[in-house]
Image: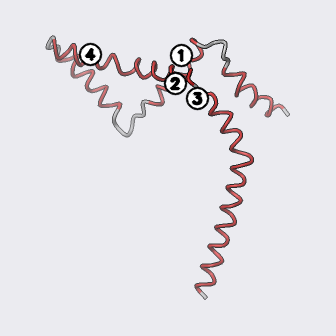
Amino acid sequence: MKIIIYTLVIIFLVITYHKFLLWLRYFVKPQIKEWLKIFLDWKFAVCYILAWAILHIPLYVGIILGSIFAIKWLTVLCTTIYAIYWTPIFNEYIIQIPIAIWLKKVFFSKDNIKSRFLLKSNIKTQK
């Protein structure tokens, strides 16, 4: 009796998983593809590297200068901030990605982000 119940449960899970995959394929996947087009181009990669540099290079410079000139408070401050970046509680991407989006908007203003995704999603909500 247990084998029959287990078999029915497995069949039910396989069917619902298949329906879930179909739902992902036909409804969610096109929207995710459109959303990811904003983030998966060379312009965003350049802006992301710049955002990383904005957040990290001052810390490296502070650590190096604090060590060379024996400025203890500068070394401690920069090391502490850098250690906070590596904690599981703080996620630097929460700061880094909006900076990269802003840099992309500033440097590549002709490539309008709103025209690609945001305007398309507004058209869908108005119908």
Q: Secondary structure at mark 2?
A: helix
Which disc, if any, is residue 45? 2
**Number of numbered discs visible in the structure rendering:** 4
Q: Nearer the viewer, residue 65 or 81?
A: 65
Residue 113, given in percent of the width and then of the height, sits at: 66, 21
At 36% from the left edge and 21% from the top edge, which residue is drawn?
56
Q: Tell me the crowding category of disc 3: few under 14, some 14 to 19, or many 20 or more residues within 10 angstroms, Cα based.
A: some
Q: Disc 1 vs disc 3: which is toward the camera?
A: 3
Between discs 3 and 4, the one toward the N terminus: 3
Tag 4 and tag 2, C-beta contact below 8 Å: no
Tag 3 and tag 4, C-beta contact below 8 Å: no
Q: CA distance from mark 1 to mark 4?
A: 24 Å
Q: Disc 2 vs disc 1: which is toward the camera?
A: 2
Residue 66, given in percent of the width and then of the height, sits at: 20, 15
Q: What's the colour scheme?
A: secondary structure
Circle 3 residue: 39
Q: Secondary structure at mark 1?
A: helix
Q: Nearer the viewer, residue 36 or 86?
A: 36
Between discs 4 and 2, the one toward the N terminus: 2
Q: CA distance from mark 1 to mark 3?
A: 13 Å
Q: CA distance from mark 3 to mark 4?
A: 31 Å
Circle 1 residue: 103
At 68% from the left edge and 50% from the top edge, which residue is drawn?
24
Between discs 1 and 3, the one toward the N terminus: 3
Q: Residue furthest front?
A: 42
Residue 49, given in percent of the width and then of the height, sits at: 45, 22
Q: Tell me the crowding category of disc 1: few under 14, some 14 to 19, or many 20 or more residues within 10 angstroms, Cα based.
A: some
At 74% from the left edge and 46% from the top edge, which residue is drawn?
27
Circle 4 residue: 62
Q: CA distance from mark 4 to mark 2?
A: 26 Å
Q: Residue furthest right?
A: 127
Type of amino acid at the residue the image marks with label 2:
Ala
